[in-house]
Image (cartoon, coloured by chain):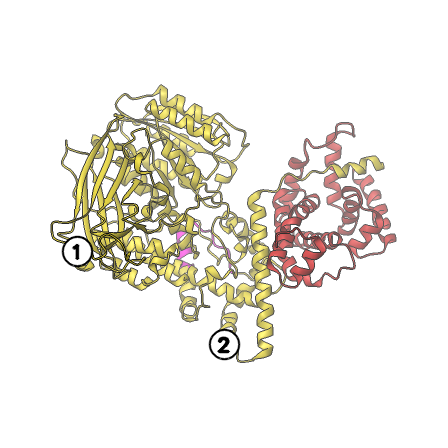
Chain colours: A yellow, B red
């Protein structure tokens, strides 16, 4: 035992701390700091006036939640913590009250109030946290294995008993999610492209509006997940058009053999602004029976990095792909390639008839191992090339929780590769899983480069929606590079605003430029865009010009048009676009929103919800209750139950605000 | 506002309730906390947990920092206490022992005695009684003088020397 030897202790090198852990720690610290400050000011307030408002409430809450107190991972005592716990419990109560068959059991919800997720990205560590709680705090409520339905039932009962009291407790003004007091953010490592809400445009200055279609629905699934965790999703995660397009609307479909889709146009008053109207532009693509879809050559490119080792990631992914495999026929082929973990080809192209072989290969996937850059994507494209089906669907399905180290580290290089393969006829779709590492921005851009959709799979029912119900749309593109351009008539419309599509805006000249890429529409997809317009003469956001040419707008006749709609699209195998045109007539507009078709009223409610969730100023006059009522009366038959689920999300959002 | 402030400034501002100062302070020291925790725990997951716990503790404890010792010495003390509390709960003993061999493999300097022996010794140091381990790691892994280690551990310098002596004796028997 010499000194030299002991000095080698200095050589202990800590590996780099992970960014997520760091963020989590800093967030937790800030939350604790805020709680300490709040405690301080509470103390001071108490000194000043014993009858401080809300004091009694806090005491009551504290007594109820005392058994959870010990759950704090920190040693410092935070009396306010009880209140905070209660605030977190309310949405949890909602969550459990709202458990139905629609939100299936494999949601890896923290089954205890996510108090320990003062560590921000709580989700990622839920399993660990629970174990730790169970071990460290024998008095804590027993940890419940999240995926067990029976246990969820028990918890639901427990929570039901407690939640009426909680919900009747007054919420602090401003709502908890925005007070900064224990602001637990869902998935802190999740990355979204930041964008601002589309602004109001004056028709006189800028009469033409151009955008690309967007049939992705990732935003809705992500929002649902975060709300169900009792948190307000970040504004950048809410793309209103994706919320609207999550639902299918029964617009008239075109006849077979004609144009691939048909626009449906309607104008009705806006529920949130008495001066304005909403112009709905609904597009419905031809529906194709799944048996008529040409054979598919699918390559699953699956992330098996260690981070996929969560119930809502690889296990859910396996079940999701199993659903898809069960839909395939003998003409289809499936290959499986993994990356980031044990990398390589897991399954050479195999006929859809050999379901057992495919499912076994899928089942054997294990997360973990090194994250050495495997040549995953190149292997995937090579297999797709090997099994190429002329005239069929050739598609790579990339499934990941956010690691895109598929073998090419440069993101632009990856996009270029995907674009190059797209030109060879191999498309790419992206399925996102999990939370905390989720990279929305990259998912979107890769899927767009690959002429595919991006979907966020948060549950088994979402997997069923994307991979079974909408399989035709996922596999069979009926039109690509679909662009919409609307020219507003300055004599009829003084101002307009496109709701959503901020990240899909195109330049006016892009519309006729076939080289500019845009969104694609699959079989059976419906797409809705909503403009809010202020008719000429109505009070808008700016004063009319005193010296303007037509300061006094003439009354609109029945023959007038609000504007003119143009849609450009390309047939899947063509590089030349075709044009669909339709006027937006003043005649035939609905005088009351109640007269508008049910689907359009529902889309309006979703649009209102998304904007309000984003904190849009335009929605200040419309309450959550108004949104709920609008959606409720437009729910219709709702065979899938998704519209009812939406109503519950409105309730959760209302309770969080 | 955006001028970088010295650590003592940040500490006093944060203790006074300045949110931005506290954020900057924690941000500046997170790596130090994590690296120290790593040396004591020997695995990344525990180190990250400890670092986070310390960050949270700081929010309430900062007011108690009296400035008589250096801020880093004070941080050491909190980290060491957190590690101790955590290990007394014993929740992750097994996992830690497991992880240790993996983490330290390949990091040994080649000119020392065989890497295996060195790894074994690190593991052995971490298995020492708490006080001895703290003293050993402060003196040898953190390169602190006996006096500094004494300040951090809140004991007399002679006591640190005693711990080191005892530890070396114990190690000789263990390795």
Label whose residue precedes the other's in the sequence (1 or 2): 2
Q: Residue A265 in the image: state x and y as whole percent.
A: 19, 47
Q: Is residue A502 left or right of residue A273?
A: right
Residue at the spot 39% in from the left edge and 63% down from the top edge? A655
Q: Residues within 10 Å of mark 1 (few under 14, many from 20)?
A: few
Q: Considering the image in quadrants, where does the N terminus of chain B appear?
A: bottom right
Element at label 2: loop
Q: Is residue B77 left or right of residue A503?
A: right
Residue lying farthest to the right in this orientation: B158
Q: Residue A402 in the image: state x and y as whole percent.
A: 46, 39
Element at label 1: loop
Residue at the spot 56% in from the left edge and 58% down from the top edge? A31
Q: Residue B51 in the image: state x and y as whole percent.
A: 64, 50
Note whether residue B91 is visible.
no
Residue on which disc 2 sits = A53
Residue B40: give its label. none
- Where residue A229 sits, quadrant-wise, is bottom left
Residue on which disc 1 sits = A554
* Chain part drawn in magenta: A141-155
């Amino acid at each position: 035992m010499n000194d030299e030897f002991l000095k080698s202790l200095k050589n202990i090198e800590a590996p780099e701390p992970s960014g997520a852990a760091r963020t989590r720690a800093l967030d937790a610290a800030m939350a604790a700091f805020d709680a300490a400050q709040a405690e301080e000011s509470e103390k001071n307030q108490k000194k000043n006036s014993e009858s401080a408002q809300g004091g009694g409430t806090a005491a009551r809450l504290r007594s109820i939640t005392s058994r959870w107190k010990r759950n704090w991972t920190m040693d410092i005592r935070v009396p306010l913590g009880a209140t905070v716990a209660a605030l977190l419990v309310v949405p949890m109560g909602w969550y459990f009250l709202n458990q139905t068959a629609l939100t299936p059991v494999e949601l890896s919800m923290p089954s205890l109030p996510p108090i320990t997720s003062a560590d921000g990205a709580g989700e990622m560590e839920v399993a660990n946290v629970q174990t730790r709680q169970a071990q460290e705090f024998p008095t804590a409520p027993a940890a419940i294995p999240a995926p067990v339905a029976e246990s969820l039932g028990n918890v639901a009962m427990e929570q039901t008993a407690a939640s009426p009291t909680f919900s009747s407790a007054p919420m602090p003004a401003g709502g908890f999610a925005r007070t900064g007091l224990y602001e637990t953010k869902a998935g802190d490592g999740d990355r979204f492209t930041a964008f601002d809400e589309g602004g109001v445009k004056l028709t006189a200055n800028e009469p033409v509006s151009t955008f690309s279609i967007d049939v992705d629905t990732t935003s809705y699934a992500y929002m649902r997940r975060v709300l169900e965790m009792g948190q307000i999703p970040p504004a950048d995660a809410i793309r209103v058009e994706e919320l609207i397009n999550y639902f299918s609307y029964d617009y008239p479909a075109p006849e077979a053999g004609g144009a691939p889709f048909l626009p449906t146009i309607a104008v009705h008053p806006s529920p949130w602004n008495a001066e304005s109207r909403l112009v709905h532009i609904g597009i419905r693509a031809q529906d194709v029976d799944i048996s008529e879809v040409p054979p598919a050559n699918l390559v699953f490119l699956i992330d098996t990095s260690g981070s996929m080792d969560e119930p809502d990631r690889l296990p859910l992914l396996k079940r999701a792909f199993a659903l898809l495999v069960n839909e395939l026929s003998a003409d289809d082929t499936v290959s499986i390639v993994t990356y980031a973990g044990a990398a390589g080809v897991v399954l050479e192209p195999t006929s859809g008839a050999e379901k057992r072989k495919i499912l076994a290969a899928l089942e054997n996937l294990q997360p973990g191992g090194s994250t050495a850059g495997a040549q995953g994507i190149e292997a995937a494209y090579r297999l797709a090339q090997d099994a190429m089906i002329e005239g069929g669907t050739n598609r790579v399905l990339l499934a990941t929780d956010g690691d895109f180290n598929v073998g090419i580290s440069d993101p632009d290089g990856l996009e270029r590769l995907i674009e190059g393969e797209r030109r060879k006829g191999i498309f790419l779709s992206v399925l996102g899983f999990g939370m905390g590492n989720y990279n929305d921005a990259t998912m979107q851009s890769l899927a767009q480069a690959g002429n595919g959709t991006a979907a966020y799979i948060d549950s088994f029912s979402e997997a069923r929606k994307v991979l079974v119900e909408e399989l035709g749309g996922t596999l069979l593109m009926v039109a690509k590079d679909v662009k919409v351009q609307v020219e507003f008539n300055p004599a009829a419309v003084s101002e307009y605003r496109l709701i959503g599509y901020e990240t899909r805006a195109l330049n006016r000249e892009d519309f006729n430029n076939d080289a500019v890429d845009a969104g694609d529409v699959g079989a059976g997809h419906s797409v809705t865009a909503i403009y809010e317009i202020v008719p000429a003469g109505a009070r808008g956001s700016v004063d009319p010009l005193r010296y303007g040419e037509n300061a006094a707008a003439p009354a609109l006749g029945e023959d007038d048009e609000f504007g003119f709609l143009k849609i450009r699209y390309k047939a899947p195998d063509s590089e030349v676009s075709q044009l669909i045109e339709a006027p937006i007539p003043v005649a035939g507009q609905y005088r009351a929103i109640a007269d508008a078709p049910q689907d359009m009223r529902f889309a309006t409610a979703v649009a209102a919800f998304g904007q309000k969730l984003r904190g849009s100023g335009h929605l200040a006059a419309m309450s959550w209750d108004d949104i709920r009522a609008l959606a409720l009366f437009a729910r219709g038959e709702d065979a899938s139950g998704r519209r009812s689920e939406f109503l519950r999300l409105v309730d959760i959002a209302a309770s969080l605000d | 506002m955006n001028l970088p402030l010295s650590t003592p400034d940040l500490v006093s501002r944060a203790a006074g309730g300045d949110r931005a100062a506290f954020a900057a302070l924690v941000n500046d020291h997170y790596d130090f906390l994590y690296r120290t925790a790593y040396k004591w725990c020997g695995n990344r997951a525990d180190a990250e947990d400890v670092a986070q716990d310390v960050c949270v503790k700081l929010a309430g404890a900062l007011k108690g920092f009296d400035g008589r010792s250096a801020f880093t010495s004070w941080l050491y003390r909190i980290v060491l206490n957190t590690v101790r509390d955590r290990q007394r709960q014993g929740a992750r003993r097994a996992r830690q022992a497991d992880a240790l061999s993996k983490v330290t493999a390949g990091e040994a300097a080649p000119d020392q005695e065989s890497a295996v022996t060195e790894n074994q010794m690190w593991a052995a140091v971490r298995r020492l009684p708490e006080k001895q381990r703290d003293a050993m790691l402060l003196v040898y892994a953190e390169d602190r003088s006996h006096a500094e280690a004494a300040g951090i551990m809140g004991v007399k310098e002679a006591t640190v020397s005693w711990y080191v002596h005892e530890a070396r004796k114990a190690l000789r028997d263990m390795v």
